């Protein structure tokens, strides 16, 4: 892995653990599975400027699985949108960092999300708006595999293809676990790539979605799809809780779990290779 990208991923993971550990509870599993993707997007692949977070024509990220807000916040803090000290206010009174993403509270958040399926529809709308404005913006959006059981996802997918939104790049965090059990047992979404192709999308698949170099290559390939008239879905096969062995071992129980500051310190030591 690129050394600088590896450092960024490590720092984001540590900051996720710090803020959730300070709060004592959070959606730790699905935050950790997104780290490589967020690092790739915010540290090289998105046209953004932390000094001008509302600039016209900027690329946007809509994290439709809004419960992964702490992962996005940790990334934004590392990218310089706000100070890392704010991470310790996660989901507390008066915070700018609620547990789920809120564009009215947090600098750098482009869309309020949390009601599963709705953020993806908003991303489709943003992509259509950027097309109409001809401002050159790309819209990136992240959905969960459990979220993919929502009918709204597929309504929006059909609309995006019909409107030829080739400035829209989606990512499925396919960690195969959701709040109650495996995705396969709750309501299987396989075969996933074939579904997206059937809905008129260009599809890329990354067998190790926690390999930052592979994710970066997929993002760059997806960008080359512009002009094709088709939106792109990148399916990332990830590990829920990736990077912290005792959280990975929890399986579906790591979706939203108690995490003490001692647990966080233990996790950070492992992430830094000090355990």
Image: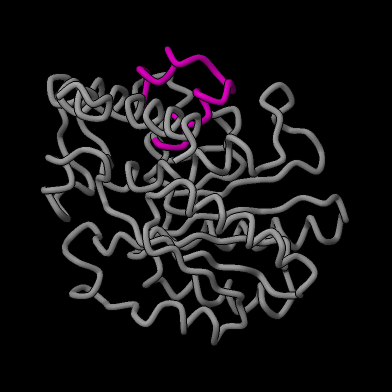
Give the percent coordinates (x, y) of residue 71.
40, 37
Could you tell me which residue is drawn at 55 percent across and 50 percent down? 216
The one of 235 and 22 positioned closer to us in this rendering: 235
Give the percent coordinates (x, y) of residue 120.
54, 60
Could you tell me which residue is drawn at 71 percent across and 21 percent down? 51
The reply to whether the magenta stretch includes residue 82 is yes
Q: Main secondary structure of the magenta part?
A: helix
Residue 6: name its quadrant: top left
User: Where, quadrant-wise, is the C terminus in this rendering?
Assistant: top left
- Write down the region rendered in magenta: 71-90
Give the percent coordinates (x, y) of residue 217.
56, 55
Relative to 73, residue 35 above or below: below
Give the percent coordinates (x, y) of residue 209.
40, 55
Residue 50: name its quadrant: top right
The one of 209 and 93 positioned closer to us in this rendering: 209
User: Does residue 120 appear left or right of residue 266 in this picture?
Assistant: right
Residue 245: name its quadrant: top left
Relative to 172, residue 257 above or below: above
Could you tell me which residue is drawn at 18 percent across and 75 percent down? 185
Could you tell me which residue is drawn at 55 percent across and 77 percent down? 155
The one of 265 and 217 positioned closer to us in this rendering: 217
Q: How is the rendered protein coloured? A: one colour
- Total marks shown come to 0
User: Does residue 214 appear left or right of residue 22 in this picture?
Assistant: right
User: Where, quadrant-wise, is the N terminus in this rendering?
Assistant: top left
The reply to whether the magenta stretch includes residue 245 is no
Relative to 101, residue 225 above or below: below
């Amino acid at each position: 892995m690129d050394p600088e990208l590896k450092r960024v991923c490590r720092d984001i993971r540590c900051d996720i653990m710090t803020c959730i550990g300070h709060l004592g509870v959070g959606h730790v599993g699905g935050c950790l599975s997104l780290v490589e993707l967020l690092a790739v997007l915010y540290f090289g692949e998105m046209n953004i400027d932390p000094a001008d977070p509302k600039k016209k024509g900027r690329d946007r990220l809509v994290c439709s699985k809004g419960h992964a807000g702490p992962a996005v916040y940790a990334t934004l803090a590392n990218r310089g949108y706000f100070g890392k000290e704010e991470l310790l206010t996660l989901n507390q009174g008066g915070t700018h960092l609620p547990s789920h993403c809120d564009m009215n509270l947090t600098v750098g958040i482009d869309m309020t999300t949390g009601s599963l399926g709705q953020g993806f529809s908003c991303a489709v709308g943003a992509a259509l708006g950027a097309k109409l404005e001809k401002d050159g913006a790309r819209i990136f959006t992240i959905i969960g595999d459990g979220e993919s059981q929502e009918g709204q996802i597929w309504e929006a997918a059909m609309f995006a293809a019909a409107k030829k939104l080739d400035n829209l790049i989606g990512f499925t965090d396919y960690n195969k676990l959701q709040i109650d059990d495996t995705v396969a047992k709750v309501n299987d979404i396989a075969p996933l790539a074939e579904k997206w192709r059937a809905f008129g999308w260009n599809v890329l698949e990354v067998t190790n979605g926690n390999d930052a170099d592979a994710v970066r290559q997929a993002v760059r390939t997806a960008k080359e799809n512009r002009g094709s008239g088709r939106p792109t879905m990148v399916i990332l096969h990830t590990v829920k809780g990736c990077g912290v062995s005792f959280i990975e071992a929890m399986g579906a129980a790591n979706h939203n779990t108690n995490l003490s500051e001692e647990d966080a310190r233990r996790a950070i030591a492992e992430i830094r290779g000090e355990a």
